[in-house]
Image: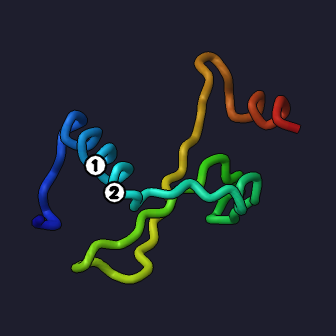
Amino acid sequence: MSKNVQRGPFASIVRAIYLLIQGRIHFPKDRLGEIVDEGEDFEIFRHMTLDPGQDRPEKPGAIFKVRFQFAGTTHGCRARNTL
């Protein structure tokens, strides 16, 4: 499959289900709650690994950071509420 192929939501869901059935997607629990410093501190709340395919690197890596912002709050207000 070409690396430049863009998938829509439905195709991505079908591919994820296919990888789950193949047993290539894993959700290890050993790093949950760990704080990672990537310029900002992020807490790992879900860790997913994907076994590489035959034509892929042995240990590919990616970090998907999710940031939640509640409507009507400022950064200072969020910082005070998280302390």
- Residue 81, position as x, y percentages in the image: 83, 29
Residue occupying image coordinates x 70% and y 61%: 31
Q: Are marks 2 and 1 in contact (CB under 8 Å)?
A: yes
Residue occupying image coordinates x 71% and y 52%: 43
Tell me if mark 1 has few (under 14), some (14-19) or many (20+) residues whose alpha carbon lies within 10 angstroms of its own. Answer: few
From the image, tell me which residue sits under label 2: 22
Tell me if mark 2 has few (under 14), some (14-19) or many (20+) residues whose alpha carbon lies within 10 angstroms of its own. Answer: few
82 vs 5: above or below: above
Front residue of 72 and 43: 43
Instruction: Give the distance between the C-alpha atoms of the residues marked 2 and 1, in whole angstroms.
Output: 6 Å
User: Is residue 2 shown left or right of residue 18?
Assistant: left
Asked which quadrant contains residue 36, the reply is bottom right
From the image, tell me which residue sits under label 1: 18
- Residue type indicated by callout 1: Tyr
SS class, disc 1: helix
Front residue of 5 and 66: 5
Asked which quadrant contains residue 13, the reply is top left
Asked which quadrant contains residue 79, the reply is top right
Q: Could you say which disc has been placed on residue 8 in the image?
A: none
User: Is residue 80 shown left or right of residue 2?
Assistant: right
User: Is residue 10 shown left or right of residue 46?
Assistant: left
- Residue 59, position as x, y percentages in the image: 44, 79
- Residue type indicated by callout 2: Gln
Q: Residue furthest right?
A: 83
- Residue 65, position as x, y percentages in the image: 54, 51
User: Is residue 26 shown left or right of residue 32?
Assistant: left
